[in-house]
Amino acid sequence: MKEILRGFKGKKIIVWGDLILDEYIYTTTSRISREAPVLVTEFDSNEYILGGAGNVVMNLKTLGAVPIPAAFVGTNEDGKNLAKILEKNDVTTDYLVELEGYRTPKKSRILSGGENTKKQQVLRIDTLNKPRIEKTAYEKIESILLELLETVDYLILSDYLNKSVMPEVLAGLTGRFPGKTFIIDSRRNLQDFRGISIATPNEPEIKQLFPGKKFLSQEDFFDAGTELLERLNAKGIILKRGHKGMIVFERGKAPELIEIHGSSDIVDVTGAGDTVISVVSLALAAGADLVSAAKLATMAAGMVVMKEGAYPIGYHELEDELD
């Protein structure tokens, strides 16, 4: 495992997906409003971090790799703040496509508490892109990805349902580069992405894909994962089952169970899926087989869920855990 981890250094991975700006607004609880039965809070501070595909980018970066994000961003302040975070972390912004009228996805979390107490989330406001994305924008991102795939062998698709990642574009990429590795994490759209190399669905997603199955036994998950391999014409699937671990499916092999790493008394699952796809991609790029990649990803995810929020795991953190 340590040898695989050492292979992470300097690996180039393209990340195509929904870059999300996560905003945390910290306030101090003041009183109950006389206008309505709601809290009145006083603003203290705010901070921005990257979520969605942006969290994948940051995980790759902190693990020693060279992430190359290719995504849509707006020309508004949110788009500029997102680009600034990437630049601050020495991540290229050369392949971001600025779109007029595009609302950079943002999740604003308002946290509040007393002056000497822990702040807790009391409200989340999502800013999503509603206007239709023009065909020319997809043509532009496809052109960028085709250019990048001339020299980079691994591409992560991080689909958070904001219409950045489209099956038609993927078809053009896989048709041109059949030997490259395409790894996807898609919320509720997975079955549309045929020809993918590796997919990393979670338990609720696979249940949604097979509404006719009752999933009362482990065999039901084995059957569904095996069938999904055929549906997607994929090489492998890593089914994430939370505190129940993972199941790895590969063509011509029996499904393999992987137990969780660490405690099942988790703190926060936010971003754990981003950690999994990041570690799996880097492990494969470092020459690991899919089961070994999944085992290392399980370890990383087990560490991340003990942190609050979208937490990019560091190279030395994972290295220390292997000792």
Image: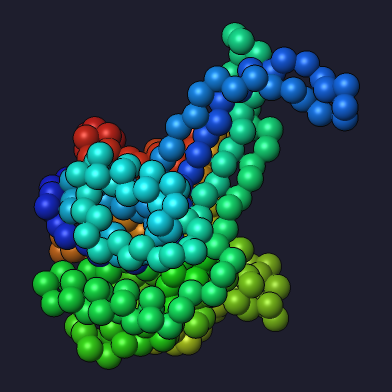
Residue at 26% over, 50% down: 60
Q: Height in image: 279 above or below 156?
A: above
Q: Looking at this rendering, what residue extends furthest in the bottom direction?
A: 175
Report x, y in % for residue 6: 13, 47
* Vertical position of residue 268 compared to residue 200: above or below: above
Along the viewing direction, whichever of 20 and 240 lies nearer the viewer: 20
**Residue 279 in which image quadrant:** bottom left
Above or below residue 5? Residue 189 is: below
Residue 143 at what x, y percent from top left?
25, 79
Q: Is residue 52 left or right of residue 277?
A: right
The answer, for residue 14, to whether it is visible in the render is yes
Q: Residue furthest top?
A: 116
Residue 140 locus on image (x, y percent): 31, 77
Say whether residue 8 is visible: no
Placement of the C terminus among the 4 image quadrants? top left
- Residue drawn at point x = 88 percent, y = 27 percent: 35
Location of residue 139 in the rendering, given as x and y in whole percent from the top left corner: 34, 82
| Quadrant of the image occupied by residue 283 | bottom left
In depth, the one of 285 and 193 nearer the eye is 193
